[in-house]
Image (spheres, rainbow, N blue to C red):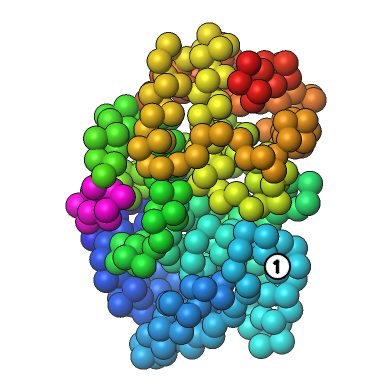
Amino acid sequence: MVKVRVSLAPPPDASYDILIGRGLLGELPALLSRACAVARYAVIADSHVAELYGKKTVARLHDGKLHADLFTFPAGEWNKSRDTWTALTDRLLAAGVGRDAAIVALGGGVTGDVAGFVAATYLRGVPYVQLPTTLLAMIDSSIGGKTGVDLPAGKNLVGAFHQPRLVVADLDVLATLPAVHLAAGMAEALKHGVIADAAYFGFLEAEHRAALAKDGTVLDRVVARSVEIKAGVVARDEREAGLRAVLNFGHTVAHAIETVAKYEVPHGEAVAIGMAHEARLAERLGIAAAGTADRVRLALEHYHLPLDLPDTAPIDDLIAAMHRDKKARGGEVRFALPRRVGEMHADAGGGWTTPVPEQAVRGVLTGG
């Protein structure tokens, strides 16, 4: 087992461990009792994960003499909504779940975000634990305490920072992960290489066939290194006041795609399209070294990830959505852009996002 500590400054001390290994769900009762001991656990999972792992997880907690109940919601990014948050909250109240309980988020990024938001707001806040079941959730969304739901106007526009007490990444669950979801997770892994570690990016380039074949040794390294990178950034900037913005490389375009396409484009695929376009934008602005965009695009192609804007996302609508992005300031669309693979651009004032004229954004999106 690998343990990565997310060290956050008190007060209060919200530091926690991320555990990475195989067979960890079998040790869940002991892990929860040590890191998040409460009177009752409310396990939240979507309808798909509930069948695969939800019932087994609750039964395992019962075997460990822990009081646990399963609460489900319909699977799909479009269910990451205020309606789902409301329904789960109402059901927790009806079941008599009190402040002596904790939420257990079992699933992918949608479940982690929704369940985390429930935990952040239920009875003014209860503790929670992340049990990610997708590669994307293991290496990205389960870490950092960002919780929330999507609105028709945009992605993640309502939410809260609420750090988990523990993250448990059991690599055995990746065996059931469909190939398309594995590739989506690799988009975030490639992003981590671009923003922080050129050698890691090179490893991902070289081992793409093994990664897609679910080679255990390769995936172990992918999860461990990506978790280290994400945890390191979060530890230095818990509330996204500065450095943490680098994690948004590819996401300004990605979030606009998801919003305009009504969440029919999976997050990882939207991030891949976003990175391809934002890397090209960085070169055109003279920020990125020549060849950076081509290298990023080729790596994404190796993982069978899309590079082109979907037909369901007209450029005018994308631009409008970007102006509603949380990073927008003073009417300007801002991007986290690379200087080269392994290094992000910071301005003279130490800021990690760059305002970009709409004409330049439009030019890259149109391929002009």
Image quadrant for the C terminus? top right
Q: Name the residue: 69% across, 82% down.
A: 91
- 186 sits left or right of 362 in the view: left
- 259 sits left or right of 345 in the view: right
Determine if residue 25 is in view. Answer: yes
Q: In the rendered structure, which segment of residues is drawn in magenta?
A: 210-218
Residue 335 % position (x, y):
61, 26
Q: Quadrant of residue 96?
A: bottom right
Image quadrant for the N terminus? bottom left
Residue 213 % position (x, y):
27, 53
Q: Quadrant of residue 118?
A: bottom right
Q: Name the residue: 45% across, 21% down.
A: 293
Residue 206, compared with residue 347, is above or below; it is below
Q: Name the residue: 71% across, 61% down.
A: 81
Residue 20 % position (x, y):
30, 58
- 228 sits left or right of 351 in the view: left
Q: Quadrant of residue 333?
A: top right
Q: Main secondary structure of the magenta part?
A: helix
Q: Amino acid at mark 1?
A: Trp
Q: Which residue is mark 1?
A: 85
Residue farthest to the front, as pictured: 311
Magenta region includes residue 327: no
Residue 96, compared with residue 80, is above or below; it is below
Residue 22, compared with residue 16, is above or below; it is below
Determine if residue 232 is in view. Answer: no
Q: Name the residue: 42% across, 77% down.
A: 53
* Helix, strand or loop status at disc 1: helix
Residue 308 % position (x, y):
56, 34
For this rendering, which residue is in front, 300 or 64?
A: 300
Q: Residues within 10 Å of mark 1 (few under 14, many from 20)?
A: many
